[in-house]
Image (tube, rainbow, N blue to C red):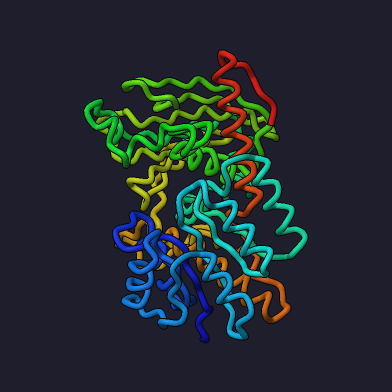
Amino acid sequence: MTRLKWGMIGGGEGSQIGPAHRISASLDGHFQLTAAALDIDPERGKSYAVQLGVAEDRAYGNWQEMLAGERDRPDRLDLVTIATPNATHFEISRAFLEAGFHVLCEKPLTMTADEAEQIVAITSETGRICAVNYGYSGYPLVRQMRAMVAEGELGRIRLIKAEFAHGFHADAEEADNPRIRWRYDPEQAGTSAVFADAGIHAFHMACFVAGQTPTELSADFASMVGDRQLEDDAMINIRLSDGALCRLWTSAIAVGRMHGLTLQVFGEKGGLSWQQQHPEQLHWTPLNGRTQILERGDAALSPQAVRASRIPIGHAEGMPVAFANIYHDLAEVLRAKKLGSAADPLALDYPTALDGLWSMRAIEAAAKSAKSGGAWVGM
């Protein structure tokens, strides 16, 4: 199997997200890191790219150099991952999509819904892929939940309870730490802090599992530490297209919560419960029945979950493998495009620019609702 040529922008040495992408992209042998612009410091970025095995002539000082250097190569890149600061995502994604590259962008896709609409339009016009790394949707048992809902095992979905709450920004003495402060600065973070940063993963997962789109929401934002301009805690109610109601709590001040991404789905015929910190098990309770534990890796799970499992049952997988499922999906779709054939339908669950657009609409609607005392805002 010939590996696909992969480029990366951002995610340099010391980055939090960079190693996760590199591990994930290489896990199945689908991608080879071929070109990179990894750091805001050009020389440091080029040096680190070479250390990672990138040829010197494809180790770039910035994304503009990378675009110019890669645009007309006969051995051009198959996929470009963008893992730069949030405010740069739109400009870089647009430039590479318009130049004919397929893109995987870290979330948020853009800083505004208008920008996200432009990206969706470009993908429609060019036929290029723009995926968004809502990587938690790659967990096998999250895909199991989606499959069970789609097959009608829960009946009509009535209620979803979604959480992404941690306590890493609860220390008032750390409020001015530059690595934390920027998240609550509207000029750098936009209209929302913790909902846009963490809660949006829970929002995407709720819509992904339910197979529904949001119609309106009501939000309450709170800033509890120091003089933060943006929220560090939020409670959001979301009405979905087929009648389900989602209750979403997200927080950065929940002391004792380490990660806190959880999802519970309640339907007419039963309920499901999953936690990212215990991703190997899914609790399933049929109506009037006993709670069962579904184990990741069990061959009796849905084809979606079986396809997403890499390690035998009883051995823990984790976040990089969930991210790897996004890359695995993209590899199958990109190869199908090259061959002019149809991709495996099971490979089509990766988050797209449209998911990024819905997320930006949700962020803007939540900020508007919070400023209006929790008024319901349409999406």
Residue in the picture at 62% in, 54% down: 352
Position of residue 238 measured from the top left corner of the image (x, y, whole percent): 59, 28
Position of residue 317 measured from the top left corner of the image (x, y, whole percent): 34, 60
Outermost residue toward the left in this view: 173
In the figure, is residue 130 to the left or right of 40? right
Snapshot quadrant of residue 228: top left
Position of residue 1 measured from the top left corner of the image (x, y, whole percent): 51, 86
Residue in the picture at 70% in, 34% down: 241
Q: In the picture shown, does residue 237 fall above or below 197?
A: above
165 and 176: which is toward the camera: 176
Residue in the picture at 35% in, 32% down: 252
In the figure, is residue 281 to the left or right of 191? left
Position of residue 156 measured from the top left corner of the image (x, y, whole percent): 64, 35
Outermost residue toward the right in this view: 125
Q: In the picture shown, does residue 191 fall above or below 272?
A: above
Residue in the picture at 71% in, 59% down: 123
